[in-house]
Image (cartoon, grey):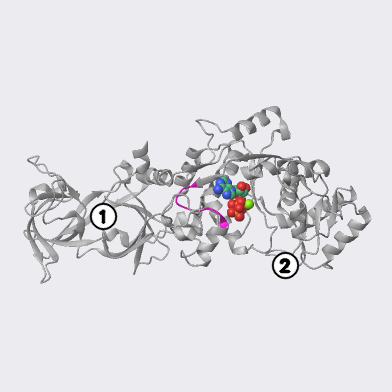
Amino acid sequence: MNEPNVGEPKKESVDFIRQQISADVKKGKHDGRVVTRFPPEPNGFLHIGHAKSICLNFGAALEFSGRCHLRFDDTNPCKEETKYAEAIEDNVKWLGFSWGDHLYYASDYYQKLYEYAVDLITRGLAYVDDQSQEEIRANRGTLTEPGVNSPFRDRSVEENLALFEKMKNGDFEEGRCVLRAKIDMASPTIAMRDPAIYRIIKRVQHHRTGDRWCIYPMYDFAHCLSDAIEGITHSLCTLEFVNHRPLYDWFLEKLEVPHRPQQIEFARLNLNYTVMSKRKLLKLVEEHYVDGWDDPRMPTISGLRRRGYTPEAIRAFCDIIGIAKFDSTVDMALLEHCLRDDLNRRAQRVMAVLRPLKIVITNYPEDSFEELECVNNPEDPEAGFRYVPFARELYIEQEDFMEEPPKKFFRLAPGREVRLRYAYYITCQEVVKDADGNITELRCTYDPQTKGGQSADNRKVKATLHWVSCQHAVPATIRLYDRLFVKENPDKTEDGKEFTDYLNPDSVEILEECQLEPSLKTATHFENFQFERLGYFCVDTDSSMESLVFNRAVSLRDQWAKFK
Ligand code: ATP
Ligand code: MG
């Protein structure tokens, strides 16, 4: 499914990051090399926001004949797990990108980072602070007031070296002290007010280094140095790091590093009607609001994939939203539009009836059926056609019939003629009901002269219905999904409310007795189809030959096109 259009030079507007990379390459900065990285923390599954970062980092590297590293930023052992790292690798590959031989872990650099910290101490640029976390916070100052120097700030180099050694050897309890960079407690940039660079964590095993270390580097320290160690040229990150850029540069300037990468910030992706913080997504999973990280309602890449999204649709979405310097919220309808656009071109058309109503064609021979030619994809002449069995007893959609139709209802009604897609014209002759007055079947006649859905006399009908043959149909469970939250911005909570209070109680509707055309029996997991007139559906991972399960990825109605 992955098409090699990944990394084709972008034709239309080039974003500010690509402009800058291009200028750097022309100037011969970084020897003309382009090396980017995607640095996820393995503490949850990736979401659509990460896809934006992946498409930017891997995409730009490809466009400039450079490379992109996948680096796990595993500096917090409390929340990280191998299963997340594995899922992240799968997701990046599935999106169509490759890191080649360049898979790294920040934990690979623990020894090196430790040596850099010792180096800072030796240069008089770091100290061990015994203040409690609360004291450190209280003494940090505010945006309008400078911070207060720690009473431990002027410890000698020797004392600091000895204390840091003890921290490393596990001689101190967790929280007893931290190593801080000695910069400027009065800096207008709070990130520069002697930030912590190492802390003690003892209660957990690191997912890769076990209990080899009991001190862990903080993100700001580990990140820039990992970039420098790997020879990253352009370190692309989201806007919340703008205020940390002076710190990023400070470490690289004060230490003897092999390369001088540059940090460039871009706006993160926000989508309406969902949440994207990993902490919140984890809560949805752990408290069983959803059925796991890959629940088709989740904005995770695994969830979108299971829902029926294709890598092409996600990449197209990331292309369209572009890269900006200002935060904004993108409408979910745009993401859906990108999926429709992709599947419209590529998905096989089939017929499926979600809420079946039986019809009997009384003038069609009993114990007989015929195979009718149905076009696989009118958008793609090469997709050809298939045969679908047509017989005396068929299912149509309940909502395609009304006994007493209002004015604008053009579908089937008593005495009215409609077309069955790729089949014949039929006319409803009689409505059969049970003792309670519920409709159990319709008795219809067909016109054998209208085979293929065309009448020789150009007789007009106002509706075309989809159908399946009762005796050939395969049953299936179909899950219809709606947005996960009822509120446009569930992150913005009202007093006394939590984001989970805005979950949509009707985010999934499960239909059990659906009837599908027989070709679908052999469909494989993640395969996408257009169910004619209904939408795009994808085979769920719970599906088997004995018990088919489909997810509705998206309906056919394009709200995005309507806005525009
Ligand atoms: P958290 O939710 O815990 O803040 P995070 O989203 O920052 O975590 P990381 O694993 O640190 O998760 O992210 C990896 C990379 O993806 C980072 O470079 C980050 O800037 C980028 N990224 C994360 N969220 C988005 C987003 N919504 N849009 C664009 N890029 C993002
Ligand atoms: Mg992060």
Q: In the image shown, does 30 or 195 lie closer to the viewer?
A: 195
Determine if the magenta segment contains residue 276: yes
Give amino acid for label 1: Met
SS majority, magenta: loop
The residue drawn where x is 91% and y is 54% is 155
The residue drawn where x is 46% and y is 55% is 305
Q: Which residue is mark 1?
A: 351
Determine if the magenta segment contains residue 216: no
Q: In the image shown, does 194 or 313 lie closer to the viewer?
A: 194
Q: Is 227 displayed left or right of 183 in the figure?
A: left
Q: Secondary structure at mark 2?
A: loop
Name the spot of residue 500 as percent of width and height, x first: 48, 60
Q: Is 270 displayed left or right of 176 in the figure?
A: left
Category of crowding for the residue at label 1, using alpha-carbon neighbours closer than 10 angstroms: few (below 14), some (14–19), many (at least 20): many
Category of crowding for the residue at label 2, using alpha-carbon neighbours closer than 10 angstroms: few (below 14), some (14–19), many (at least 20): few
Asked if one can make out residue 203 in the rendered structure from this viewpoint, the answer is: yes
Q: Which residue is mark 2?
A: 210
Q: Secondary structure at mark 1?
A: loop
Relative height, residue 437 to residue 326 (above, below): below
Asked if the residue under mark 2 is in contact with the one under mark 1, i.e. CB atoms within 8 Å, the reply is no
- Magenta residues, as a range? 271-278
Asked if one can make out residue 98 in the rendered structure from this viewpoint, the answer is: no
Relative height, residue 293 to residue 335 (above, below): below
Name the spot of residue 536 as percent of width and height, x first: 34, 51
Name the spot of residue 12 as percent of width and height, x first: 50, 30
Whichever of callouts 1 and 2 sits on the residue coming sooner in the sequence is 2
